[in-house]
Image (cartoon, rainbow, N blue to C red):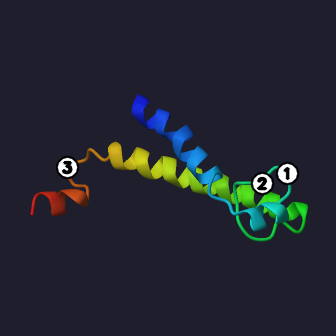
Amino acid sequence: MKKILLLIPIMTYGFVATACPACEAQQPKVLRGIVHGSGPTSNWDYVAGIVTLIIVIAVLFYSIKWMINPGEKEADHIKRNVLNF
């Protein structure tokens, strides 16, 4: 787990270092060096991006959580039909 936590800053730095100079000039100061293309056209673009990010993180969290510990322990659960086939 510690190795994964150490990889996150390294990967983030790699993404920051990949933006081209033409795209950096079009971005606001907050996003400079992180994203490509034209910058956000209004504050609603930031809101949409943040909401999307929250949804993606929640889906990723619950996907990993339920993969590791699904929680179905009943003997007649439908997964038993596949596992005992």
Give whichever of discs 3 and 2 has the lower sequence position: 2
- Disc 2: which residue: 32
| Element type where label 2 sits in the image | loop
Q: Residue furthest top?
A: 2
Residue 83, given in percent of the width and then of the height, sits at 15, 58
Q: Amino acid at mark 1?
A: Lys
- Looking at the rendering, in which quadrant would you find the N terminus? top left
Foreground: disc 3 or disc 2: 2
- Disc 3: which residue: 75
Q: Residues within 10 Å of mark 2 (few under 14, many from 20)?
A: some
Give whichever of discs 3 and 1 has the lower sequence position: 1
- Is 41 left, or right, of 80 in this rendering? right
**Residue 1 visible in the picture:** no
Residue nearest the viewer, comparing 51 with 5? 5
Dots 3 and 2: beta carbons under 8 Å? no
- Is 6 left, or right, of 71 in this rendering? right
Residue 28, given in percent of the width and then of the height, sits at 86, 57
- Disc 1: which residue: 29
Residue 79, given in percent of the width and then of the height, sits at 24, 58
